[in-house]
Amino acid sequence: MSVKQRRNVEELEPPSSELLYGLEDNPPWYLCVLLGTQHFFTMVSTTIPIPFVLASLVCLEPSDPARSYLVSTIIFVSGLITFLQSTIGVRLPIVQGGNFAYLIPTVALLSANFASCESQRAANLTAAQQQEEWQARMRAIQGNIAVSSVFQIILGFTGVIGVMLKWITPLTIIPTVSLVGLSLFDLAADRSSQHWSVSMSTTVLMVLLSQYMKDVSLSLPTGYRRGYGFIYSEVQVFKMFSIIVALLTSWLVCWVLTVTDTFPPGCPSRTDRSTLISNTPWFRIPYPGQWGMPTVTVAGVLGMMVAGLASIIESVGDYYATARICGTPAPPVHAINRGVGIEGVGVTVAGLWGSGSGTNSYSENLAAITVTRVGSRRVIQMSAMVMLVAGSVCKFGALCASIPEPIVASLYWIMFSLITSVGLSTLQFVDLNSSRNLFVLGFTLFFSLSVSKYVKANPESLKTGLPLLDQTLLVLLQTTIFLGCVLGCFLDNTIPGTKEERGLVSWRAQQGDSKSCPGYDLPYGMDAIRRRKWLRYLPFSPTFRGFHSAKYNVTVNTTTSTPVPVTTTTSTPVPVTTTTSTPVAETTTSAAII
């Protein structure tokens, strides 16, 4: 989440005293189910485009039940990871879901190692051969995602992420995140071109509901009291469900136009083109290796690692924003480390299960917390249960996968443009009057897009004589976020410039103060963890306060427990008292910051 988005959330966020349920509170079970289902639908509306893109990239036919399997898998995996993150990870009410950043290296990987879908269809393959072709693509995607997650796990559980963030500056983040959206405009245009009128009308409806009507409230029944009847409340439906309402409305219109034969046979927007729902079983539980044994390449792993780094940056920002909304102190260092590490574990799970995408936190669900004024962790855990159930009901996945592609293409316009603006919003920290900053930003964006476009059009130009190196360079140089991250980081950290000019002062100040809070402790075993002093050296342990905290704690304990320094210097007790209290205060502060 961008800083601008987080500030917008802060303007809407209720003070902690106005929260109906805080982080540690447990609402009634029925309220948990209702609010958890709301979070589920909010997540699904953002996640649906990912399996649609993957289905087209791996050359799946419209009526193939595997389309519904992809949708069900990513929902199921999101439920697993959401439960892990909210229970033993950062322990904030954060929903985890599919990550668009992984689509960039996926496109580069497939274009470098597999034939196009057009040439595959022209080959007149049998059904068994077609299945092997798309599963081979999925195995390549999931294997590289799973192996790349080791990088994210190490960054989190070793605490290295804190060191790396010192080098990851705003001018590194801006091109890395923005290029995720900018690189996918070809995909959005291609899918929308199947039926421009449907795609554009759905896009207009989404903009109308989400931007112009977001503050419109509808009086809806929210309860029932015996003797009084239904209880009505003002609900801002469009603020939370604008995408779902727009999709369902366009889908209904397309169904009417299909029934009345207004859409001619073969039209991509017809709702009767696919027998997907009838061909899909009711229940199917996703499992690891469901597409076969994953395959791995060096180039694919490196590309996915860059996507993981981009997701880490976004997720850490979401941690701070969620804590503010829930009226909880900013997450301490051990919670950040554990959150990043568990997110890496989630990417491993997503890779092994074959969802086709990594995962990260969803800032869209923060709006639901703001509106409902319920920041309970239990609600998100219930939402995770809903995801697991929905991911096991294949008919639900088939229903989502049967939405006409021109309708889903409208989501691409909204999502990809928001991703681009999320990256650009970080510009508020950078001095845009500096010619140095303008050069770093402009050159990084333009050079990354240009090189990627050239290499994609001329793959034969890379001939080093080493096949492995050729393949690695071919994938990496087509991955714009890799080029943007490396080039932006190198230029910003080597070209001379002040910290204020580069935006480092305000960027690091926005993280706030990280104080210890019981809400970030693990749910079980805290007494045993506190008794074992060696655990304070583990960056993901709740007793960890920084790599120098143990040293500082010894100094403080020695000073406070031993009265010798006070009694020795009896002639000047006041300076001794001042000297004793000052180091303790400074030590405590520095230990909390590190």
Image (cartoon, rainbow, N blue to C red):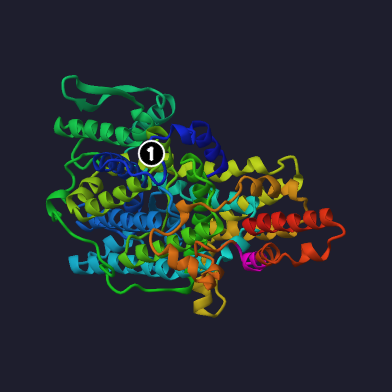
Quarter of the figure with residue 426 = top right
Q: Nearer the viewer, residue 162 or 398?
A: 162
One can see residue 338 in this view: yes
In the image, the segment drawn in magenta is 546-554
Q: Residue at x 30, y 33 (%)?
A: 245
In this image, 277 relative to 208: left or right? left
Q: Is residue 550 magenta?
A: yes
For the point 33% across and 65% down, which residue is it?
138
Which of 146 and 336 lies nearest the eye of the viewer? Answer: 336
Residue drawn at (37%, 74%), measured in percent from left and top?
295
31, 419: nearer the viewer: 31
Say which residue label 1 marks: 21
**Neighbour class for label 1 at 10 Å: few (<14), some, many (≥20)?**
some
User: From the viewer's perspective, is residue 297 above or below residue 389?
Assistant: below
- In this view, the residue farthest toward the bottom is 466
Instruction: Locate the C terminus and report the quarter of the image it occupies.
Output: bottom right
346 on left or right of 63: right
Q: Nearer the viewer, residue 224 or 63?
A: 224
Majority secondary structure of magenta residues: helix
Q: Tell me the amino acid under the disc marked 1.
A: Tyr
Image quarter of residue 452? bottom right
